[in-house]
Image (tube, grey):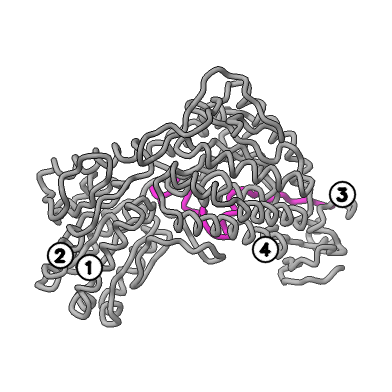
Amino acid sequence: MFGHNFIAGARSAQGNVTLQSVDASSGEALPGVFHQATVEEVDAAARAAEAAFPAYNALSPERRAQFLDAIATELEALGDDFIATVCRETALPAARIQGERGRTANQMRLFAKVLRRGDFLGARIDRALPERQPLPRPDLRQYRTGVGPVAVFGASNFPLAFSTAGGDTAAALAAGCPVVVKAHSGHMTTAEFVGEAIIRAAEATGMPAGVFNMIYGAGVGEPLVKHPAIQAVGFTGSLKGGRALCDLAAARPQPIPVFAEMSSINPVLVLPAALKARGEQVASELAASVVMGCGQFCTNPGLVIGIRSPEFEAFLQTLAARMADQPAQTMLNTGTLRSYEKGIQKLLAHSGISHLAGTVQEGNQARPQLFRADAALLLNGDPLLQEEVFGPTTVVSEVADEAELRLALESLHGQLTATLIAEPSDLSRFAALVPVLERKAGRLLINGYPTGVEVCDAMVHGGPYPATSDARGTSVGSLAIDRFLRPVCYQNYPDELLPEALKRTNPLGLLRLVDGEFSREAF
């Protein structure tokens, strides 16, 4: 381990401040130290990305696809010592890390496929109409190009899939944008391994030296976001952290977009017919979803809503019993555990919320908890019920009827997901809720649980604020590339000055919108 910052294909350690990575379970220091980036190194990393942008953005989609494929191969080659290191830094089991390594590689390959398809370019052509009256139309051609260097802030809960080589990095690189990654302090050694893998891939495929940069340390985020070379930000983390980055970006002389995934309680609606048919099964499945991965998923179901009935009471008793049986688990780091403890204490102290299951939260592990909230709190938009508790806990609330159920949903803030546990008769009876859910969440589920996000073309991992800072995008799936592209229109340009995607010969063989109709033909 060098523990040095990654800048323009080389390593740099100018500062005297060093950091230590620790074992998440024992608190024991792991081998090696990491050098916090100085202000000068942050500047150098951003400028390296800026210097690499013209050449990298001008590469053909195929060349960039080869780079992403090479990153995937390098990630898959990281061996048992790597897996063991990630497990020690995060307390996550080896099987989870192995699966996440595969997912991270597959994200890279998904974007390589997107590049080879070419539809991400959005080529549109309106040919000149010189004879049109009363005025002729010029030749107009539009496509999408990278916005410029992107700052990426890795997540704590997915040390691979949402971190150094995660979805934001993959999407930005696919869009033609060099990146500057701020390594997460909770898994710096993991970041080192992954950063080295990306550099090997960049060198093997002949990428510009500054296509990937990574810096370590606390306090480096502000100068990175403020740097004039940075043109967009990708972030996964807390609402507080995401809002701070948004405010910094908006206050720049040249404001830039921040695509932040921040906070969600992911409501689950358990509807009457489903409870009658399989209430005990639903309770068991829901408990398993709440405690999966120690509840450290951004799609963890943090709020369960049902309509008052004997079946709902029976469901609640079963859910409480299942939650009481769940063991304590080690969280990602002590900071995450302390935040979980504070969230639990707030719920315990609220007069309208009762504790249904779970042992006293103490020690160095998170203990699963179940709470019940008065419906009045939900209907009145109590802020505490809108606040995510990151960990293995959930809150249940019971409303009186369909009208109150609708009001409860309308009181909620924006969410990543919203789930209906329903039988066919429920879907008919409560069909009017679907438009409400569409306004509240980015992904709508029926008879599934939100913990689990498929990496594919159709996935949306985003939603109205505060789930994300921009509901028009997603941080998972091929549509994520859109966040780091912008449209450019060329008027009356000759072929030799046009980008390949817009040339009259159509050298890339793209499907293009030509005079209102899709075509692959040259003209």
Q: Pick whichever of labels 4 and 2 is earlier in the sequence.
A: 4
Which is more foreground, mark 3 or mark 1?
A: 1
Q: Is residue 470 magenta?
A: yes
Check disc 1: other Cα within 10 Å, few if <14, some if 14-19, many if 20+: many
Q: Pick whichever of labels 4 and 3 is earlier in the sequence.
A: 4
Query: Cα distance, mark 4 to mark 2?
Result: 46 Å
What kind of element bears circle 3? helix
Q: Residue at x 34, y 36 (%)?
A: 334
Q: Which residues are magenta?
A: 464-493
Residue annotated with mark 3: 497
Q: Residue at x 44, y 39 (%)?
A: 242
Residue 72: image location, x then y, percent: 64, 55
Judge from the rendering whether residue 161 lies leftward or rightward of residue 71; answer left or right: left
Q: Is residue 465 visible?
A: no
Which is more foreground, mark 4 or mark 1?
A: 1
Which is more foreground, mark 3 or mark 2?
A: 2
Residue annotated with mark 1: 283
